[in-house]
Amino acid sequence: MSETHVTPEVEEPEEPTNRPAPTRRMKEWFSRPYVRPIVIICAVITLAFIPFAWVVLYFMNGSGAPASPTMTEIEKTILVFTIVSGPLMAITLAVLLYSLLARGKGSWGRVHGEEPPMQDSPAIRTNSTAVVAWIAATSVLAAFLVVWGMIELATITKDSYGSIASVQGPNAPKPIDINVTGQQWVWTFQYPDQGNISADTLVVPINTPLYFNVTSVDVVHDFWIVELGVKIDANPGAVTNTGVTPTKLGTFNIRCAELCGLHHAYMETKIQVVTQDQFNNWVREMGGSRTA
Ligand SMILES: [Cu+2]
């Protein structure tokens, strides 16, 4: 269809000019009537979307997060990924919205009814500048996300699994082992180092690495300490391990993050992050002994 509207000048072999062809093609492309509105819609959507990264964090922080270095890293990743995905979503939505909604004549118009199609330049599918720019931009973006993700994953793994190995020195707090058991529909916590006391609320001292041995006695559950950024499956017949160091005093949420039956939504309890003295007192009250 577009051939009928190609102006003769475009088809003519070009005289050598002082302006290179790609620049001229880009200029032509930008002068197309729909490019400007799409670019404007794109900019508006991007600017409107990016603040949502902070809205998400605001709601997460409302309940006390981040309460551990792990959660700090997770929040940073949410922020960066949301910001980076903003312009991408905007390009897609801008083209979609313009194609669906733009009507009438003028620079915002699209063709409909009996109106003749507007003058258009040649299609850009053979525009090597656009192809190379698009592939380069998306490759750089994908590479950035992969590298960022791997670095963050390594950091979080070090914070959790590696927290035991990294604690050294005479004054370093000794890590606390905690056996976590999920069953329909409660969590139970057992402290092997504190005289095997057990509780249905998790009480832990601040700034002390915790090491969780997680299992289940019936179906698959998922042990999730929301504000500390800990989440790992609880499988029957197997033990999974993770860890975290709480760095904020307070009471936070523990939930089950795996649909596990009728009362799954109510399979929740609390974690109380307290001072070392308070923790020692709690252990004594529970009839345990501080063997650590
Ligand atoms: Cu569950």
Image (spheres, grey):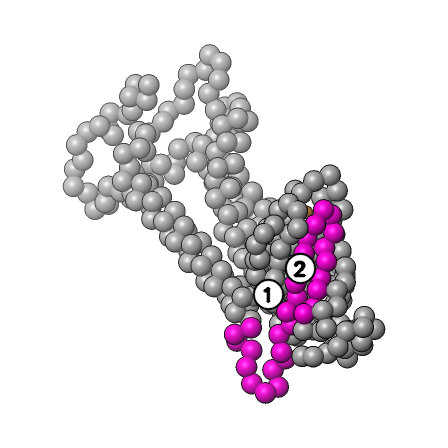
Does residue 178 show up magenta in the picture?
A: yes
Q: CA distance from mark 1 to mark 2?
A: 12 Å
The x and y percentages for residue 257 are: 65, 48
Residue drawn at x 52%, y 76% as measured from the top left? 166
For the question of whether residue 27 can be seen, the reply is yes
Is residue 286 positioned above or below 123 on the image?
A: below
Ligand 1 within 8 angstroms of badge 1 C-beta: no
Quadrant for the C terminus, please.
Answer: bottom right
Circle 2 SS class: strand
Disc 1 or 2, which lies upstream in sequence? 2
**What kind of residue is marked 1?**
Gly
Q: Nearer the viewer, residue 287 or 232?
A: 287
The magenta stretch spans which residues?
164-192
Ligand 1 within 8 angstroms of badge 2 C-beta: no
Q: Is residue 147 left or right of residue 217?
A: left
- In the figure, residue 244 lies in which quadrant? bottom right
Give the labeled residue for mark 2.
180
The x and y percentages for residue 183 are: 70, 50
The x and y percentages for residue 144 are: 42, 56
Give the labeled residue for mark 1.
243
The x and y percentages for residue 93 are: 52, 36
Is residue 89 positioned above or below 190 on the image?
A: above
Q: Is residue 116 left or right of residue 130?
A: right
Q: Nearer the viewer, residue 21 or 101?
A: 101
